[in-house]
Image (cartoon, rainbow, N blue to C red):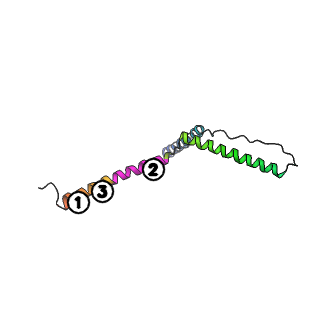
């Protein structure tokens, strides 16, 4: 029992480390491994509302540019989702297996039960 617990713990630890490593690798490929530094500006208390509106519009424009750059990086690198790929491969395999099984059943019915076999 103790060996089972140790093995499960080791496998769980390896999976956790592998997942963390995969997330870090994808973050580095997308260029988002380092956070954007926070810029703190000293502002005067007597600044007008118009200046604040202009600053907000500049922030919105720069954030749209940053989003466009990040989406371009994602398109270049491509999205990698292990579970989606595994699910699509599993679905294709199950589709192939079910079609071959149905084909075998239909040929059995046609040959044996309907009497259309090789007896000619």
Name the residue furthest bottom.
114
Seen from the viewer's position, the closer of residues 72 and 28 is 72
Q: Is residue 95 magenta?
A: yes
Label 1 Cα crowd, 10 Å radius (few <14 / some 14-19 / many 20+): some
Q: Which residue is the extreme one toward the right?
A: 46
The quadrant holding residue 35 is: top right
- Disc 2 and disc 3: Cα gap in Å? 22 Å
The magenta stretch is 83-98
Q: Which residue is mark 2?
A: 87
Disc with the residue nearer the chain's start (3 vs 1): 3
Taking the spot 21% from the left edge, 59% from the top edge, the residue there is: 110
Q: Which residue is mark 1?
A: 109
Residue 94 falls left or right of residue 117: right
Q: Secondary structure at mark 2?
A: helix
Instruction: Residue 29: say if magenta.
Output: no
Residue that label 3 marks = 102
Using the rendered view, name the quadrant where residue 65 is placed.
Answer: top right
Q: Are marks 2 and 3 in contact (CB under 8 Å)?
A: no
Q: Which mark is residue 42?
A: none
Q: Pinpoint residue 89: horizontal percent, then vertical percent.
A: 42, 47
């Amino acid at each position: 029992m103790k060996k089972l617990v140790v093995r499960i713990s080791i496998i769980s630890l390896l999976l956790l480390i592998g997942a963390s490593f995969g997330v870090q690798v994808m973050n580095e490929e997308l260029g988002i491994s380092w956070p954007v530094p926070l810029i703190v500006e000293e502002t005067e208390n007597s600044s007008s509302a118009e200046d604040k509106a202009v600053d907000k519009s500049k922030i919105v424009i720069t954030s749209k540019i940053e989003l466009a750059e990040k989406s371009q990086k994602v398109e270049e690198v491509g999205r990698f989702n292990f579970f989606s790929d595994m699910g699509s491969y599993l679905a294709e395999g199950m589709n192939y297996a079910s079609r071959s099984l149905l084909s075998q059943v239909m040929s059995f019915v046609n040959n044996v039960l309907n009497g259309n076999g090789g007896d000619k």
